[in-house]
Structures are given as structure tokens and as C-alpha cells.
Image: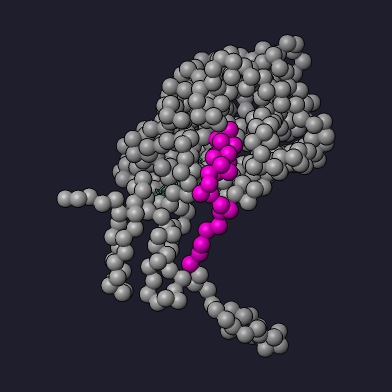
Amino acid sequence: MDKKNSLSITDNRTGRTYEVPIENDTIRAMDLRQIRVHDSDFGMMLYDPAFTNTANCKSRITYIDGERGILEYRGYPIEDLAENSTYLETAYLILNGELPSRQELEEWTYQVTHHTLLHENIKKFIDGFRHDAHPMGILISATAALSTYYPQAKSVLDIESRRLQTYRLIGKVITLAAFAYRHSRGLPYVYPCNDLSYTGNFLSMLFRMTESPYKPNPVLEHALDVLFILHADHEQNCSTNAMRSVGSSQADPYVSIAAAAAALYGPLHGGANEAVLRMLSSIGNLERVPDFIRRVKAGETRLMGFGHRVYKNYDPRARVIKRIADQVFEVTGRNPLLNIALELEKIALEDEYFIKRKLYPNVDFYSGLIYQAMGFPVDMFPVLFAIGRTVGWIAQWQEMLTDGEQKIARPRQVYLGVRQRAYVPMEKRPSTMREA
Ligand code: CMC
């Protein structure tokens, strides 16, 4: 039989049949617009709240096979990158599509390192926050504020400007994050040090007191670097969608990243690692695990760090994290909450409720335990996620801007509200309009 790469759709309202082309296993939503009952109709649309089955772009950055638990950046498996690469090298790969040569990596590292300093004035901005301000709120606001320091960043179609903002964003995000932390602790800000690695520099800006020179613990430095790799991109998730959507209006990358980071902040996304730790602490001991699981199954609460829109299998990032956790705990001592996490995982993976819904641990289930063991307060966890993800947001933003098919993002709606009513003057309204 001659196979055609098209889909035939019969509209039973009219008996008419339409043929729409199939490309990459998708049809174009606009091809449905021709389907109408009357010539004056708007035409058929797709209704897909939360984009559960709608591709918004063609991308060449990150591949996920959620059923099989596969994650690749530019074709390289996440396990391979976690084992062999560094965050900055992976960031280069994500942005440019290929691993860098030695010289390219040196140049890239030099540029990022030399853009870690902030304008002095930003310190006053951060000082304006209350002492107990959530560092994610500070990071989001301070990133947006950087837009006012670099007005030329508005030239989003200028490749050189984009390159410069990329160095700045990846360089400065660690400094902003560290300053947010130091502010919350009432500690003096520590300036970046070019002799250290990207992650070592971050640790220095966070935790350095009076020691000179500051030497980060190599195991912890490596673990955090791997965690940044694991978080570097994850295709079209909520925050990346925010980045692409805000960026599609040609807003500058600083405010677009602030929007993406705001999306990340929510407990169903990057705020989940913080929620996991709070959940583990509230469970408190092993005896209370079964009761907690009962409450989850009764729909009273969620098992944070479990489940994923795309993964219907063990999140491959969670596997790597479990390995890294062992290395970290050898240095820091075992996090006492680990036993509770392991017990939750054990029960959940054997329980019908979780099996049926294909709920497995995601990246956030174990990452918080590592962060806590390393000395990070719980509210810094989403900030750490944001640091790693910054490169993903930038790469996706660049891809969107250079994609000839993309335009300002503007979804449609199905309007179900009232139409064409005459304005009711105040004296003619009942005591509440709802009663009318
Ligand atoms: N605990 C208990 N039940 C859950 C959970 C959970 N963590 N996640 C999903 N379910 C249930 C949900 O109640 C629903 O059951 P039913 O069919 O009986 O109504 C079913 O599983 C499908 O859930 P959903 O909410 O329709 O799935 P979704 O794709 O919209 O949500 C999710 C994905 C990640 C928001 C959700 O699994 C969740 O809230 N997980 C906890 C928060 C979390 O760990 N987030 C981090 C995600 S990984 C990091 C990142 O990429 O941001």
C-alpha cells in the first residue's frame, strides 16, 4: 500500500474530509483552521491546557525520552557529561552545539570568569531587602535590575550583543546568588576570585570567612559542578517556556531570565527541592513514613520530588545524584534525613498508587539532601537550580530568536463568557451583581 505522510480528518458535522500533512509526527495546528461549518466561522483550533501535547518549537538542544528515562544535551548522554565534563564545558556545548576545543574552552572560561564582577551599586540594591528575604526573590529582582545596567542588551537580534550578555549572565549569576546568601546571613560580600574554577569561585563567594587563600573542598566543588550539569537544560519546561515566551516579545535577556527564574521558583518546578527538604523534616522519623504515604494517597498532600510531566520512569538525573550523594556524605557525614528519603522511595516504588501513575523520584528528590549536607540553607536550593539552568534558558532563547518560524508567543483561548451586554448603571444594579 502506498503510504502517505498525511492525516485525513473527517468532520462529522459537515461530512467533509480534510488532508493535513504530517511532519516529524506532528500536524500544524494552523492546518486545522480550514475546518469550519460555516464560511464565517473562525475555524478549528487545538485545545491543550498546560501544553500537555503541543510542541511549541523545533529544537536541537536537549533530547528527553521520558518513557525510557533518557536525557541528552546535544546528543551527549547526561551520565557521560556528569562523569567526564565540567559545568562550563557543558554550558559551551549547550550554547554552541559542539564540545569546545582546548583553545575555545580557555577563551570561554576566561570570558565567563572575567564577567563575574557586579557593578558596585548592585550591592545597595541587595542591601535594600529585608534580612530574611528569600534569596530566590533577591536573585529574580537583581537579575531584572541588571537590565538597567546594560541598556544595549535590548539589541537582542545583534549576535555580538547576545554573546556579551551570555558571558555576563553566566558569570554574574553566581555572584548575585552568593550575595543574596551573604545578605541573608548578615555577612560581608565576598568578591569573585579569578584563580578558582566557576564552582570553586561560587563556593568562595558563599562561604569564605577570613581564610586566605580560600580553598574549596574538591569533593564538594566537583559535586556541585555535577549538580549544575544535571540542571543545565531540560527542554520545554515551565521556566524555559517562560523564557521563550517573554523573550519572544524581544525583551532583553535580563528581564527574560528574571521571568524564567520566577517560573522556576514555584514548588511544582524548581522550588520542589526546597519543598522536599521541608517535607522530610516535617515527617521527622521513619515511623511516620507510612502515615505520610497514606495521606499522599488520600490526596491530602503530594510526595514532593516524585513525578514528572515527561519522565514516566526513573529520572536519569536522580540516578546520578544518588551516586554523588554518597561522595558528598563521605566528606560531610550522612544527612540524617536520607533514611527517611530512602524509606519513602522504597515504599513508593512498591505501591500500586505510584506504580499506576508512573511516579518515580525526580531530580529534586535527592538534590536537597546534598545541598543541605554541604551547608546550604533550604531557601538557597532553588537558587542553585537557577544557576545551573541559566545556560539552558539562554540557549533556548537564542534558538527561539534565530528560528525564522517563531514570532511573539500568543496563545488562543476558548471563550465561554457572556457576550454583548448593555452597561448597567449603578442605581439599577442589585445589591450584588452575582444575584442578578
Ligand atoms: N505525589 C502524589 N501524587 C502525585 C504526584 C506526587 N508527587 N505527582 C503526580 N501525582 C498524581 C496526581 O495526583 C495525579 O493523580 P490522579 O490521576 O489520581 O489525579 C497523577 O499523579 C498525575 O499527576 P499530574 O499532576 O496530572 O501530573 P503533571 O504532569 O501535571 O505534574 C508534576 C507533574 C511534576 C508537577 C507533579 O508530578 C508534582 O507535583 N510533583 C511534585 C513536585 C515536584 O517534585 N516537582 C519537581 C519536578 S522535577 C524538577 C523540574 O523539572 O522542575
Q: What's the residue at 19%, 50% (across, down)?
A: 2
| Residue that protrudes farthest toward the bottom in the picture | 428
Q: Is residue 393 above or below residue 47?
A: above
Q: Is residue 249 magenta?
A: no
Q: Quadrant of residue 383?
A: top right
Q: Position of residue 72 (x, y in %)?
A: 43, 30
Residue nearest the observer in this picture, 305 or 68: 68
Residue nearest the observer in this picture, 347 or 412: 412
Q: Is residue 18 above or below residue 54?
A: below
Query: Is residue 235 found left or right of 432 in the rendered image?
Result: left
Q: How many marks?
A: 0
Q: What's the residue at 69%, 36% (across, down)?
A: 161
Name the image quarter holding the C terminus: bottom right
Query: Is residue 310 found left or right of 389 in the rendered image?
Result: left
Q: Is residue 329 above or below residue 434?
A: above
What segment carries the magenta color? 391-414
Query: Is residue 349 found left or right of 146 in the rendered image?
Result: left
